[in-house]
Image (spheres, grey):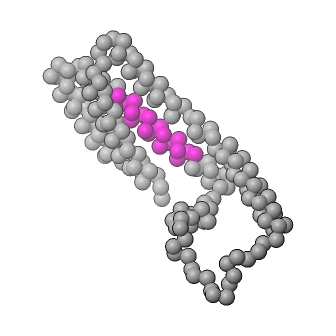
Amino acid sequence: MTKLIYRLLFIELFFSLFLFIQGYWYWLLNFQLAFVSSLLIILGSFHSYKRMVNKRIEAGESQDDALLEKLEDPHGLYEEDLDEGQNLDQDLDLKAVVKEEKERLKAEKQSFKKTLKTTPALFSPLRFAPYIFLVLSFIGLNNNHILDIPAFLIGLGAGITAAVVLGKAWIVSTNP
């Protein structure tokens, strides 16, 4: 992963040096501010999401197999056929239905409690500080009349691309 980081930094340095030598320092400034802010936004989101998943695992939340089956086969195409002797319209007594509904509501309350335990990962400063940096850099460039929208947008795109590449490499390197 460090080789990937070094390659991306080399490309960034080469591009910056080329723009600086050509005299496009407005363009370079716009590109760099957008690149850094979008890179930090995406990597901060990756980190916060990873922390949130780890906290949910620590809280004892596991994946629901019924939900996975419903997502994989929403229309029940791969379910086993019922025997002809089975009655599809079995009558359930009212007490059993009420009992099942109470258990379902109780399980939802427990999952809500688990979700509240994991919300600090959603509101981490690693997610919000880069957004503040992006907005302030945009406002600063605009107030000084040096905002170049194409350079800013290209910088955002390059930052997102670099962050996704780095994020994938980071996730692969940290998972066993």
**Residue 79 relative to residue 156: left or right:** right
Quarter of the image where one finds residue 95: bottom right
The one of 102 and 30 positioned closer to us in this rendering: 102
- Quarter-of-image position of residue 120: top right
Looking at the rendering, which quadrant does residue 67 occupy?
A: bottom right
- The x, y position of residue 11, in whole percent, is 24, 37
The structure residue drawn at horizontal position 16% and vertical position 22%, both measured from the top left corner, is 21
Q: Look at the image and tell me whether residue 103 can be seen.
A: no
**Which residue appears at 75% of the width and 55% of the height?**
105
In front of the other: 123 or 81: 81
Task: Where is residue 63? Give x, y as percent.
Answer: 60, 60
Q: Note whether residue 112 is visible.
A: yes
Taking the magenta stretch, the answer to whether it contains residue 40 is yes
Magenta span dominant secondary structure: helix
> Could you tell me residue 110's position as x and y percent?
73, 52
Q: Is residue 10 left or right of residue 96?
A: left
Q: Residue furthest right?
A: 95
**Which of 34/21 is in front?**
34
Is residue 173 shown above or below 9? Answer: below
Tell me the residue at 67%/78% (across/down): 88
Q: Is residue 96 magenta?
A: no
Residue 163 versus residue 79 in the image, above or below: above
Task: Say whether residue 35 is left or right of residue 21.
Answer: right
- Name the outermost residue toward the left: 22
What x and y, as percent, mark residue 173?
A: 42, 52
Number of marks: 0
Which residue ends up furthest to the bottom in the rendered image? 85
Q: Which residues are magenta?
A: 34-52
Residue furthest to the top in view is 144
Residue shown at 30% from the left, 36% from the top: 158
